[in-house]
Amino acid sequence: MAEIQTNGRAYESLLEKVLSMNILSSDYFKELYGLKTYHEVVDEIYNQVNHVEPWMGGNCRGPSTAYCLLYKFFTMKLTVKQMHGLLKHTDSPYIRAVGFLYLRYVADAKTLWTWYEPYIKDDEEFSPGSNGRMTTMGVYVRDLLLGLYYFDTLFPRIPVPVMRQITSNLEKMNLPTKPSGSTGDMTRGSEDTARRPPSVKASLSVSFGQRAPHRASTRGSSPVRRPPPSGYDRNGGDEPQQRSPRRSQSRDYSDRDSDRQRERERDRERERDRYREREKDYGNDRRSRRDYESRNRRNDYEDDRSRHDRRSRSRSRSRSRSVQIEREPTPKRDISSNKEKSAVTMNSNLAKLKDLYGDASNQKGDEGIGTRRDSSSEEVIKLGGSSWR
């Protein structure tokens, strides 16, 4: 079976959170766990539902029977055939109303007009609210399309282009394009529902004599109407004739609270200024410390660099000297010049010896002529002996 084209939202988030939480925690909804089929839920609507407001009337503050059964349908995910069975049901108008509510919450906004159009002029009468105010099913369906609020609860918002199309379709059918008020006023806190708080939060706060957190004041919507001040003139007096001591006391309390609030604001401002000053001083100290450390690191780096340069220069000098020494060629001795020098020195020595001892060749005569040698070295041996060699 084909399912209804939905808006894509989970059924837990279709209703307002307060209403959804109260439905899930209610004893009646827990009893509905025993209903397993679509027909059992329809029979329960026929037997138990007498209005389709979200909250129970009177002194009860829980969710209504109709909305508990509507949430049960959310969990069952109805098909197209089952929805047609609800909308065309002839036993009870509340069965049909629950079906229209299901479509308003679950169905895609683009398909709402297709679902609602056959019933726009339906003339079956019933009372949607617990106040007994009668209306027709067609007016109820039009209010579901045109309204955003439903008895102080919120419907899913219909996109503006879709709403324009719905309005133009109603104009073509010569039908009103404004809500008639059969589903409550179009704003929260309406006078029609002022006899009870708009939500469970408000009811709890009213019962404990407190102010509801989401409303400006719950006194106007409280079931217990408080009388006006004793000195107030209802017959045209603009101001009370006698000021109530309770009001003056509350005004004094409010003045004291405002003074205390201003004093707290001043203290907070002073504390913020002190904190900013401390942050500024701390930031200056950190910057100065960073500058000092960076300068020290820079000086140490420069000292190390200069030492390294000096060492490198000294090493380069020593290396250049050693290389120069290695490269200098050793002078070659001139053997021939040395020989000449030795011969000259020998001749000079020989001349000195001759002067000292005389010429040995003259003393021996002709004997030395035959054995005489031209070598000057033998003459030295002959004259000087072995010590001269």
Image: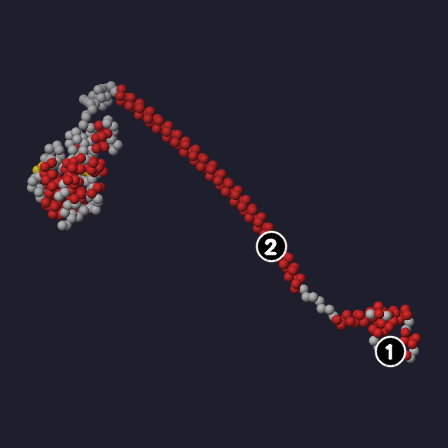
Label 1 crowd bin: few (<14), some (14–19), many (20+), radius 10 Å: few
Q: Is residue 223 above or below residue 358?
A: above
User: Residue 10: image x %, image y %?
Assistant: 21, 44
Q: Which residue is situated farthest in the front direction here?
A: 386
* SS at circle 2: helix
User: Residue 287: image x %, image y %?
Assistant: 49, 41
At 20% across and 31% down in the image, what residue appears? 197
Find the distance from the CA under tag 1 to the CA under tag 2.
Answer: 73 Å
Q: Quarter holding the C terminus? A: bottom right
The nearer-to-camera label among 1 and 2 is: 1
The amino acid at mark 2 is Ser
> Which residue is nearer to you in this view: 107 or 332?
332
Which residue bears the numbered disc 1? 372
> Which residue is nearer to you in this view: 205 or 48?
48
User: Residue 30: image x %, image y %?
Assistant: 17, 37
* SS at circle 1: loop
User: Which image quarter: residue 271?
Assistant: top left
User: Which image quarter: residue 260?
Assistant: top left
Residue 205 shows in this picture: yes
> Which residue is nearer to you in this view: 166 or 3?
3
The amino acid at mark 1 is Arg
Which residue bears the numbered disc 2? 312
At 84% across and 74% down in the image, what residue appears? 378
Q: Is residue 166 above or below residue 187?
A: below
